[in-house]
Image (cartoon, rainbow, N blue to C red):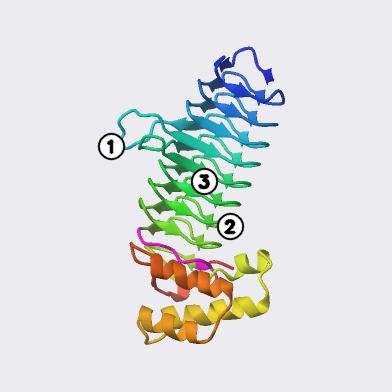
Amino acid sequence: MNAHPTAIVSRHAELDPTVEIGPYAIIEDEVSLGKNVKVYAHAYICNGTRIDEGTEIHMGAVIGHLPQDLAFEGKKSYLKIGKKNIIREYVTIHRGTKEDSSTQIGDESFLMALSHVGHNCKLGNKVILANGALLAGYVNVADGVFISGNVVVHQFCNIGKLAIIGGFSGVNKDVPPYMAVRGPSSVWSINLVGLRRAGYKSKTISEIKEAFKLIYKSDLNTDQAITKIVEGNPGKEVMDLIEFIKNSKRGICKYRFSPDDKDYFG
C-alpha cells in the first residue's frame, strides 16, 4: 500500500498492496479497497464500504457515510462499489438505512463532481451522473443511463436501461428504458443517439420507435398499446420495455413535446 504520511488509515481496513491513498484522506474501519484503487487527497471512506479493482475516489468525496434518513437506527449497513468507476470531487454516496442493507454501484460508472447517491440506491454498469445530479433514496438506475447536470430524482424511482435525462429536470415517475426525458417527468423521444452508440441494430431501433409511438403518441391507453405491441411479436429489447412498464409502481413519465426541444438531445 502506498499511503501519504498525512493519511489516516484504520489498521482494521483491508487494503490491497497496490492501493494508493493521497494526503489527508481518511479510511475508517471495515473498509475494503481492491487492486489498484486510488484515493485522492481529503477523500473520506467510511465504515462498511467495499470498493473493487481500479476505482478512483477523487478529492473531497465522502463515500459510505450515514444515510440521510430519519428511519436509520444506527445498525450496520453497507456500500458496495464495483470495478473501474470514476468518482469525482465532492461526490457523496450514503450506505443503506436498514440493517444489513446496502447501496450498490456497478462497474465502469462515472459520477461527476458534486453528484449524490442516496441510501439504498442501486446503479448498474456504465452509468453517468453529471455534475450536481441528485438521487434520493432507493432509486434504481439501469445500465447505460445518462443523468445530466442538476437533475433531481425522487425516492423509489426507477430509471430504465439507456435512458437519458436532460439537465435541470425533476423526475418523480419511472423513466422507461431507451427514453429521453426533459422537464418535469416528461418523455420527449427515444434516446436515439444512446442506442446507436450502444451498437443497437437498425431493426431493433425501429421496433423501439414503433413501441414509443404506440405508447406515447397514439390514441390508445397504455394497456391497449402494450397489447398491440405484443401482437407484433417484437424482439427482446421491446419486451424488456413492456415488462418495465407493467412492473412500474410509481407510474411512468408522460409524453410532452415542445418545438424548443427539437434539437436538445442531438
Front residue of this view, candidates 107 and 193: 107
Which-is-in-front pick, marks 3 and 1? Answer: 1
Asked if marks 2 and 3 touch (Cβ < 8 Å), the reply is no
Closer to the eye: label 2 or 1: 1
Query: In this picture, is 102 found above or below 163?
Result: above
Q: CA distance from mark 2 to mark 3?
A: 17 Å
Mark 3 to mark 1: distance in Å?
28 Å
Chief secondary structure of the magenta span?
Answer: loop
Percent of width and height locating residue 103: 46, 41
Quadrant into which the C terminus falls:
bottom right
Residue 173 covered by magenta stretch: yes
In depth, the one of 61 and 207 nearer the eye is 207
Mark 3 Cα-neighbour bin, 10 Å: few <14, some 14–19, many ≥20: many
- Give residue 100's quadrant in the image: top left
Q: Position of residue 177 (x, y in %)?
A: 50, 66
Q: Nearer the viewer, residue 266 or 221?
A: 221
Task: Find out whether the residues at labels 2 and 1 contact each other: C-beta distance under 8 Å.
Answer: no
What stretch of residues is rendered in magenta?
Answer: 172-179
Residue drawn 28% across the image and 37% down it: 71
Kindly identify which numbered label has been placed on residue 71: 1
Residue at point 66%, 64% (across, down)? 198
Q: x, y percentage for residue 166? A: 49, 60
Residue 24 location, x and y as percent? 57, 18
**Callout 3, which amino acid?**
Asn
Residue at horizontal 48%, vertical 78%?
212
Under circle 2, the secondary element is: loop
User: Can the viewer see residue 180 in this picture?
Assistant: yes
Of labels 3 and 1, earlier in sequence is 1
What secondary structure is found at the residue carrying circle 3? loop
Per the image, the residue denoted by label 3 is 131
**Above or below: residue 193 compared with residue 45:** below
